[in-house]
Image (spheres, helix red, strand yellow):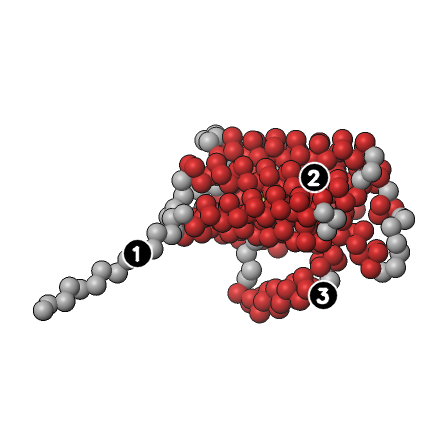
Amino acid sequence: MIEKPRVRRTVNLHLLPSAMTVLSICAGLTSIKLALDGEPIPAMALIAIAAILDALDGRVARILDAQSRMGAEIDSLADTVNFGVAPALVVYVTLFNSPIGWMVVLLYAICVVLRLARYNAALDDGTLPPYAKEFFVGMPAPAGAVSMIGTIALKLEAKKLGFGDDGWWTNQWVLAAWIAGTSLLMVSAIPMKKVHTFAVPPNLAVLALAVVAIVAAAAVWQPYLLIWVIIISYVCHIPFAVRSKRWLAQHPEVWGEKPKQWRAAQRATRRAQPHRRSMARLGLRKPGGRP
C-alpha cells in the first residue's frame, strides 16, 4: 500500500497584527477597570503593554506583508481607546477629586482624537515634502499617554520616599496644568522625531546595548523614575527635532537622497561651522577676515 505524502499545513499569520491590536484594546480597557478597583499600578502597566503592542503590530504587519485598510482602521481606533480614553479615565479616577480634573481629562481625550484624525488625513496628502515622514506633527498619542501616567508615577514615587500624598505632586491645579500642556502639545504643529529615525552608529552599538540593559533593569527596580527619565528625554529632544526639520526645509537639494544621507549632510554642516552661532552672537570675526 502506497502511503500518500503528508501535506504540510501552512499557518496563516496574516491575522496576527490585527490580533495584537485587539489585545492592546483589551489591555487598555482592562486598565480602566483596574483603576476603578483602586489598583493604579497594574493599570499603568497595562497601558504600557498596550503601547508596546501598538509599536509592534505595524512592524509585524509589514514583515508579514499583511497590511490592510481594515487593519489600519482598527489600529487607529485602538489608539483612541488605549492612549486617549484609558489614560484619561485612569488618571481621573486615581488623582482627581474636583471638576477641574474632569475638564482637563476631557480636553486630553479630545486632543488625542483630533491628533489621530490629523495624522490619518496626512497619510493621503501627496503635497507634503519627502522629509515630512521623518517627523510627527505634534506629540504622538503614545507619548501623551506616557506623560499622563507620569503624573501617577510621581505620586507613587513620592509616597515610596515617605513624602505622603500632600504636596505639589498631588495639587489639582499643577496636575491640570501638566495635562493641559500635554494636550496642547499633541494638537500643536511642533515637529517631533519618529523613533525609527534615530540611528545608532556602529561604534556605539555596544553602548546602546548597555543602555537597553540598564533600562530593562530600571523597569523592574525603579519603574516610576524610568517613566520620568523617558518623559524628560523626550521633551529635551524637541528643540533638536525643530532644528532638524528647519534645516531640511532650507536644503531642498537633499530631498532626493535617502534619510541616512540627510542626517549625514546635517552632521557635516554642523562640523564645518561649529562656532558660527557663538561667533555671530558675540560679534567676532574669523582671524584674517576683513574688518
Q: Quadrant of residue 79?
A: top right
Q: CA distance from mark 3 to mark 1?
A: 42 Å
Which of pointers 2 and 1 lies earlier in the amino acid sequence? 1
Residue 103 position within the rendered picture, expressed as x and y whole percent measured from the top left: 76, 31
Q: Residue at 55% of width from left, 56% of height from top?
A: 199
The residue to which callout 3 is attached is 221
Q: Are marks 2 and 1 in contact (CB under 8 Å)?
A: no
Secondary structure of residue under mark 3: helix
Q: Is 33 drawn above or below residue 128 in the view shown? A: below
Q: Of the numbered discs in the image, which one, if any, rests on residue 144?
A: none
Which of the two residues, 247 or 170, is positioned nearer the viewer here? 170
Determine crowd level at label 3: few under 14, some 14-19, many 20+ residues with C-alpha closer than 10 A: few
Most distant residue in the left direction: 1
Q: Is 53 drawn above or below residue 75 in the view shown? A: below
Amino acid, disc 3 = Trp
Q: Residue at 68% of width from left, 54% of height from top?
A: 42
Secondary structure of residue under mark 2: helix
Q: Residue at 88% of width from left, 54% of height from top?
A: 164
The residue to which callout 1 is attached is 10
Which of pointers 3 and 1 lies earlier in the amino acid sequence? 1
Which of the two residues, 107 or 35, is positioned nearer the viewer here? 35
Secondary structure of residue under mark 1: loop
Determine crowd level at label 2: few under 14, some 14-19, many 20+ residues with C-alpha closer than 10 A: many
Is residue 19 visible from the viewing direction of this image? yes
Residue 255 position within the rendered picture, expressed as x and y whole percent measured from the top left: 48, 41
Amino acid, disc 1 = Thr
Which of the two residues, 111 or 211, is positioned nearer the viewer here? 111
Q: Of the numbered discs in the image, which one, if any, rests on residue 88?
A: 2
Is residue 191 visible from the viewing direction of this image? no
